[in-house]
Image (cartoon, coloured by chain):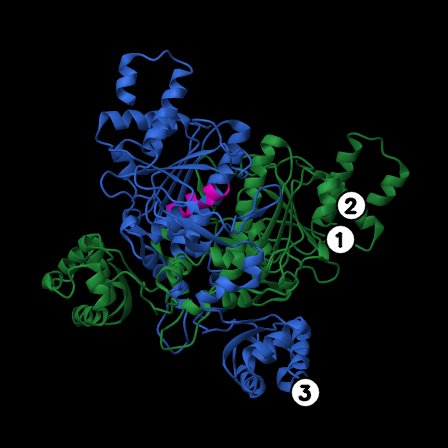
Chain colours: A green, B blue
């Protein structure tokens, strides 16, 4: 449903969908950012005074938070004071128009505000109602606060990340929040698909811890089958070799030659065909078992020339490899540039910031625009526009009385 | 569309959808596993002889790969020899019935087989055609092999993961594959939603590197605004403190108290209210600047008692915290158990393996069944069943001639 006129009906597959976004910080806003990237209209309901907590998170550009701008690009903002009867009336009207509601409060908060899933299932059964929380809305931990750091620790990924002889490391990006955001998005869009058939909304209940468990790959099964607790493997794959970083003259780079054919191609590309004939290295199992000898043998060769020399040779031979890029290198990566993955975002100030765009490429829809900045809203920026759209929408099917006018203006 | 009779129409929001799955190893199979978890029928097209490469990946249970079983649970398998005219005819009939096609070959492979996106857009415009590859189907790196290890290195996450004074670490799970799988799933389901309106399929082109860039959170923006290259921060959050692990008597655990209120609650829970009054620690900015003093002050207290003592106290006070769980601990985690997140999967043998289930909880659909194993298919196990369904389906609208019978039996 759309309140006003859909300005850009071909923006993406979700154009025409309106999302009421009660979420704050990262997991919820990242989810609704993906929905906006796919064409949905996202109306951010912000709290009176300060709005989304991340408006106060650095770094700042012309007094606006770059953190906020990154994840709230392309959304609209309206401040609603849930204690004010007038604002509650506005919210009811927005709910009548909305397709999706997203929130990431702790379980119980939306119920206390009067907008819980149970109530909306009765009054607005067409709404897809999505909650993202640390532990989900059921179970004994449901009321505990679940931050990214907490679920990375509890869900096992920290125990697998870092070096075997060192302490567990955090994944260098908020894997707990982002994993949950992506599963939530899948749940929401699946529910929209189903709604296109049966006209019914669905409750989506995402727990960050559940998502962490689902992203542990085969670690659970390996423990269940082998009885040994999977540990940290530094920069290598636990069951493939060579599949790790190696020293070149000017730094480290990775080679991922996890099968015999690639290993032979690698040996040739390094001008060391004897490696592939060495009885220590003739199968992946042997290479894993003799990993330290293998690393020594490869580095005896790679350490003589710089990274780019080996990357060029290995690429020419079709062997998977890469420099270990720092973040600054992404801006000049020819592939990311060719795929328009570096976009500009901005707030109400003049300065645009570069960040990564939407990685979901869909035929028939416009790709990321690498030039024109996508704008994140100022606090309450779209209030007047949204109210006038609601008014026009009301006017189209009821005659407007003074009372209604008073509530809306 | 469904070839035969949908056995379980309320399995999930995607029931009724048929996915032809040409994918192998991890990114593609994880994507189609999520689609199957949501109710889609997934028919895995496997190569003659060996099938999916991961059928040969350990660990093994009764000679079947636990790796394969984990990600191919709930799917069907048919071996098709693309060089055989008979099998090509079967494939054409399957395409007539399919809603979604998923493949993760290198760009060009499906075209050479005769089932590329351009051809199917002409002959089967209703199909949602999804490709997952290392770098996507456009751009200068398009033909390069892109493994998880390669995109973790190239996309920046390794540069952010590990300890500041140590080498970059790999994320301990296949973040490159899994991130791409989730974005691909979002693209596919969005395209199915759109198709419910306009009856047209969409091309979905996912590059693992693009997805890595999109998952770097604010790292790109931070570099763009501040000009310093984001680095590794070990187990702490770069801009929140305390938000890291601390030593207890019997190991390490995390506390995530990233705002002033939580910090005061933490100080009280540790029976050290003076911490919250220390002028070094009165704001998050100060706590970040004086992080090493902060850690020393906290560990002077936490190191006296075991982890569980502090977890109980901090939980009671509402302060986010967690033990750093190893994988074996997930099986006994009360929250994962209560949410039915630990499921059983099996192959054709008798022994079931425990792994994590679907984390997308949707109201009105059955939750994960923690008891009955979900079965992964043997190679070509469903050939006869699929052929007889195709035959029945053909028979329902054309009279069956001998030629057709010859092709199908």
Seen from the viewer's position, the closer of residues B11 and A253 is B11
Q: Quadrant of the C terminus of chain B?
A: top left
Count of numbered tags? 3
Q: Chain of mark 3?
A: B
Residue range corresponding to the magenta coloring:
B29-38
Seen from the viewer's position, the closer of residues A237 and B323 is B323
Q: Is residue B388 magenta?
A: no
Is B77 placed above or below A356 here? above
Residue depth check, mark 3 versus mark 2: number of the one nearer the observer: 3
Say the numbered circle drawn on residue A90: 2
Q: How many residues crowd mark 2 within 10 Å: few (<14), some (14–19), many (20+)?
A: some
Q: How many residues crowd mark 1 within 10 Å: few (<14), some (14–19), many (20+)?
A: many
* Magenta segment, prevailing SS (helix, strand or loop): helix
Seen from the viewer's position, the closer of residues A144 and A61 is A144
Image location (x, y in percent) of residue B286: 60, 80
Q: Residue at x 15, y 60 (%)?
A: A282
Which residue has dot 1 on it?
A: A80
Q: Is residue B34 magenta?
A: yes
Identify the element where label 3 is drawn: helix
Image location (x, y in percent) of residue A268: 13, 58
Identify the element where label 1 is drawn: loop
Q: Chain of mark 2?
A: A
Residue depth check, mark 3 versus mark 1: number of the one nearer the observer: 3
Say the numbered circle drawn on residue B290: none
């Amino acid at each position: 449903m759309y309140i006003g006129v859909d300005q850009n009906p071909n923006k993406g597959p979700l154009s025409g969908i309106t999302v009421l976004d009660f979420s704050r910080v990262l997991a919820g806003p990242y989810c609704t950012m993906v929905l906006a990237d796919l064409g949905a209209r996202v109306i951010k309901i912000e709290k009176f005074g300060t709005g989304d907590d991340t408006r106060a998170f650095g770094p700042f550009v012309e007094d606006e938070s770059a953190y906020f701008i990154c994840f709230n690009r392309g959304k609209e903002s309206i401040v609603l004071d849930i204690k004010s009867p007038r604002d509650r009336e506005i919210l009811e009207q927005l709910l009548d128009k909305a397709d999706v509601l997203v929130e990431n409060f702790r379980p119980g908060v939306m119920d206390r505000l009067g907008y819980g899933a149970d109530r909306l299932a009765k009054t607005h059964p067409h709404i897809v109602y999505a909650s993202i929380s640390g532990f989900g809305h059921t179970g004994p931990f449901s009321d505990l606060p679940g931050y990214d750091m907490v679920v990375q620790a509890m869900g096992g990924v920290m125990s697998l990340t870092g070096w075997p002889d060192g302490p567990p490391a955090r994944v260098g990006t908020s894997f707990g929040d982002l994993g949950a955001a992506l599963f939530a998005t899948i749940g929401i869009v699946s529910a929209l698909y189903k709604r296109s058939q049966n006209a019914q909304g669905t409750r989506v209940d995402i727990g960050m811890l559940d998502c962490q468990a689902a992203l542990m790959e085969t670690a659970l099964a390996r423990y269940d089958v082998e009885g040994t607790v999977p540990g940290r493997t530094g920069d290598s794959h636990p069951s493939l070799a060579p599949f790790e970083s190696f020293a070149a003259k000017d730094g480290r780079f990775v080679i991922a030659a996890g099968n015999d054919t690639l290993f032979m191609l690698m040996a040739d590309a390094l001008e060391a065909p004897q490696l592939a004939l060495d009885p220590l290295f003739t199968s992946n199992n042997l290479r894993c078992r003799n990993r330290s000898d293998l690393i020594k043998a490869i580095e005896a060769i790679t350490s003589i020339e710089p990274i780019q020399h080996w990357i060029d040779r290995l690429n020419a031979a079709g062997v998977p490899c890469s420099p270990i890029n720092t973040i600054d290198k992404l801006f000049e990566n020819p592939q990311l540039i060719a795929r328009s993955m570096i976009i500009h975002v901005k707030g109400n100030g003049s300065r645009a910031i570069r960040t990564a765009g939407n990685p979901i490429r869909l035929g028939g829809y416009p790709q990321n625009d690498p030039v024109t900045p996508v704008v994140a809203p100022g606090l309450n920026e779209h209030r007047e526009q949204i109210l006038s759209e609601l008014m026009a929408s009301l006017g189209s099917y009821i005659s407007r009385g003074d009372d209604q006018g008073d509530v809306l203006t």
